[in-house]
Image (spheres, rainbow, N blue to C red):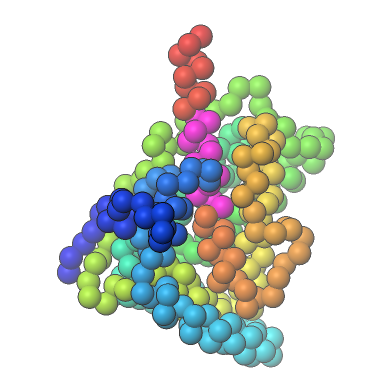
Amino acid sequence: MNKVALPRACSILDAAHNPENPNSWQTLWLDHSIPINQGAKLAWLRDSNTWSRQFILPFVRPLARLSIVLLQIIKTLIPNFLSSSTLLHRLLAWALSVFATPEANWLILRHFWIGSENLAFLNANIKGAGVEMNSLTPHDLPDLKDHLFIKHDLNLFNFITRLNLQQRALGLNEISPKDTLDFSMISNDGNFPVTAQNAGWLNVLDLQTCIDVFTPIYQLFLSDSDFWRSVHSLQLDETIGIYAAKVLNKPDGLILVNNKHPMVVPATWSAGYRLVLHGLSAEMLHALLVEAKGKHQQSNENH
C-alpha cells in the first residue's frame, strides 16, 4: 500500500487567483489571521476539499447524531453495555488505517503530541503547578491501541484537577505565570515524527466524516460515564485557553481557542462537530506557543 508523508502540495491552493470565481480554500490558505502550523493548515484544507466531505458527510452526520441519541437511551438503561476500551481502540486504529485519508490520520496523530506539549508548557510555567503528567506521543496508528483516546481525555481532567488541588494546598487563588517562562518542551517548528500514512484506494474518508462515523462507535464501546467524560473534556478548551492567556499575557491571541462555555455542556449528539473544534483549538494554541518560543529565544539572544 502506498504511504504519504504530510504535508503535500495542493494545486488548487497554488493556482492563479480568479477574481470572477475565487476559490474558497485558496482564500483560507492565503489568510494569515489564524495562528496555525502551515503544514497542519495545508493538510486540513486538502482534507476538507474532498468529495467525501462534500457528498458523504451531509448524509453521515444526521444518521450519526440519531445513532448517538438512540445509544444514549440504551446506555442509560444499561450503562456498561458492550463496553471494551481495548476493542474500541483496536477497531479505530484498523478503520483509520483502511478508510481515512492520509491527511486525516496525520492530523489525528499529531493532535496527541500537541496536547501533550500544550499541557506540559502550562505545567512548567504556572505557579504552583508541577503535577504528574502522562505524555502521549504516537508515531503511527497502531500506537492508538494503547487506549490513547481515553488517556487523552484523562490527561485534561487530571491536569486541571491536580493543578487546582495543589494550588489550594499552597494557598494560591489565581493562575499566574512563573517569573521566567520555560519553552523547552515546545517543538521549535511545530512538527513531529509521525510516520507516513496509508494512501490506498479505500483511504477516502475525510477527518470530519471519520469523526462523525466513529463517535457513535466510540459511545458504543465505552461505558456511559466514560463517554460523558469524553464529551465534557471538549468543554475544557476555554479553561486551557484561559490558563495559557494568563501565562503568556496574551488574551487577544487566544480568542479562537474555544468550544463555548466550559460549564455548559451541549447534548452528546453534537460531540463530533465539537471534537473538530477541539482539534483546531489545540492546533492554534500550539502555534501561539511556538511563536512565543521564537520571540523568547530571540529576546534572550539580544540580551
Depicted 208 relative to depicted 197: above or below: below
Residue 88 in sight here: no
Q: Is the magenta stretch mostly helix, strand or loop?
A: helix
Residue 166 in sight here: yes
Stretch of the chain drawn in magenta: 281-293
Q: Which residue is drawn at 58% across and 34% down?
A: 124
Q: Residue at x 69, y 86 (%)?
A: 76
Instruction: Give the quarter of the figure containing the N terminus.
Output: bottom left
Q: Which residue is drawn at 27% across and 56% down?
A: 11
Foreground: 62 or 238? 62
Q: Is residue 88 magenta?
A: no
From the top left corner, tell me how far across and down residue 133 is, in percent.
55, 46
From the top left corner, tell me how far across and down residue 258 is, in percent.
64, 54
Query: In the rendered picture of this protein, how many numbered marks are placed on residues?
Result: 0
Is 302 on the left or on the right of 235, as rendered? Answer: left
Depicted 79 relative to depicted 93: above or below: below
Depicted 23 relative to depicted 51: above or below: above
Furthest residue toward front: 20
Quarter of the image for residue 91 reads bottom left
Depicted 85 relative to depicted 46: above or below: below
Is 90 on the left or on the right of 254, as rendered? Answer: left
Is 92 on the left or on the right of 204, as rendered? Answer: right
Furthest residue toward left: 1
Furthest residue toward top: 303
Quarter of the image for residue 168 reads top right
Q: Residue at x 69, y 44 (%)?
A: 242
Foreground: 146 or 286? 286
